[in-house]
Image (tube, rainbow, N blue to C red):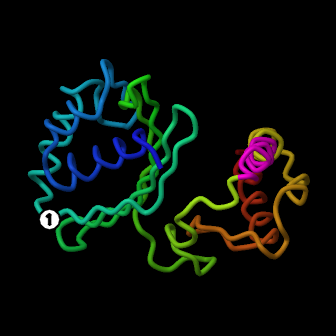
Amino acid sequence: MGKKLDNAKALYLEGIRDGNAEEAVKKYTGDRYTQHSTGVADGVAGFLAFFEPFIARNPVRDIRIVRGFEDGQYVFVQAYQELNGGRDKWITTDLFDTDANDRIIEHWDVIGPVVETTVSGHSQIDGPTEVADLSETASNKSIVAKFADEVLIGGNFDRATDFVSADRYIQHNPLVDNGISGFAAFAEQLASEGR
């Protein structure tokens, strides 16, 4: 898609999968590298302090980028990681900020274990991997932002039907079912837990 996405993928694949952490972090990050991942400190030194021991502990690393895209200065990447012949399997969702030279300057992530059997029957990574309907991007972003603001953040779960398709909504959270009924059950659970 572009240089920003290429750099984010390369940091993962060259730096972590291929074990060239120092070379990759110096090549693909900018003048600063602010880290929001738990246990990883800022900068080149922080990246190396975490990933050099990680690479040593996990000599067999099957890491694949499942999907990714750029949106302005930001890059989204979802990766599948299988370590040491399947001993550990993780799904990582990463958001990167980039500088004017397309190099990474900030990183956030969400990491979870692979769940083999899900409520919805969908895995955490199946589904489309290529961006389609680019002409709908602005409209789709607006819908998702309103859904997040009004339903997820605002707690107006009764408004979910304004945004969630009754029968076409596919869920990749392993604990939530498809469709509006799956989302409603999930929302009810959150409400009962005071979230």
Task: Point out residue 98 in the picture as x, y percentages from the top left corner.
Answer: 43, 29
Q: Residue at x 61, y 77 (%)?
A: 119
Q: Residue at x 81, y 76 (%)?
A: 167
> Which quadrant of the structure image shows residue 32?
top left
Q: Residue at x 15, y 58 (%)?
A: 58
Task: Point out residue 116 in the picture as x, y percentages from the top left corner.
Answer: 44, 78
Residue bounds of the magenta highlight = 135-146
Task: Point out residue 110 in the picture as x, y percentages from the top left corner.
Answer: 46, 48
Q: Which residue is mark 1?
A: 60
Q: Is residue 161 left or right of residue 111?
A: right
Q: Secondary structure at mark 1?
A: loop
Relative vertical location of residue 139 with respect to residue 132 in this rendering, above or below: above
Q: Is residue 51 left or right of residue 1?
A: left
Q: Is residue 176 left or right of residue 13?
A: right
What's the residue type where badge 1 is placed?
Answer: Val
Q: Residue at x 38, y 25 (%)?
A: 101
For the stretch drawn in magenta, what is the main secondary structure? helix
